[in-house]
Image (cartoon, rainbow, N blue to C red):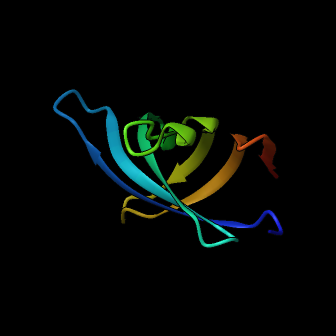
Amino acid sequence: MDGTFALTVNLDADAKGKIVGTGLMALANGRAVALGVKGKTTAGVTALQLTGDKTANALFGAVKLKLTIETFSNGTGNILALSGSAFGQALQWP
């Protein structure tokens, strides 16, 4: 395994305007990790917390990520920063 991963998230706003959703982290070895997502948007910047879904697999609790995203009116965004850990590996971008 070379440490690469792909991250897919599906987001929605709840009744209070907070962001909720699910995600999937696909690891280089083919393993897929289910994630829960929550966050909030302030002044065009969205802060997300992604955590491994322990109900899907107790080992997924080893995944904790934070993302800061510049959000655009067309529903897309640009990742400004990522940090956290997954299965003992520290993750940070940039």
Residue at left 71%, top 44%?
87
Q: Quadrant of residue 74?
A: bottom left
Give above or below for 89 relative to 1. Answer: above
Q: Using residue 19 as the reference point, say whether residue 79 is left or right of it.
A: right
- Give how far across and how far down residue 79 sits, in percent: 63, 55
Side of 93 relative to 47 (left or right):
right
The residue closer to the viewer here, 14 or 31, is 31
Camera-nearest residue between 64 and 18: 64
Residue 10 vertical position relative to residue 43 in the rendered view, above or below? below
Residue extending furthest toward the front: 58
Can residue 49 be seen by looking at this rendering? no
- Find residue 26 and report its horizontal and vertical position in percent: 57, 66
Residue 16: x %, y % from top left: 21, 27
| Residue 93 vertical placement versus 63 (above, below) | below
- Residue in the picture at 78% in, 46% down: 91
How many numbered circles are shown? 0
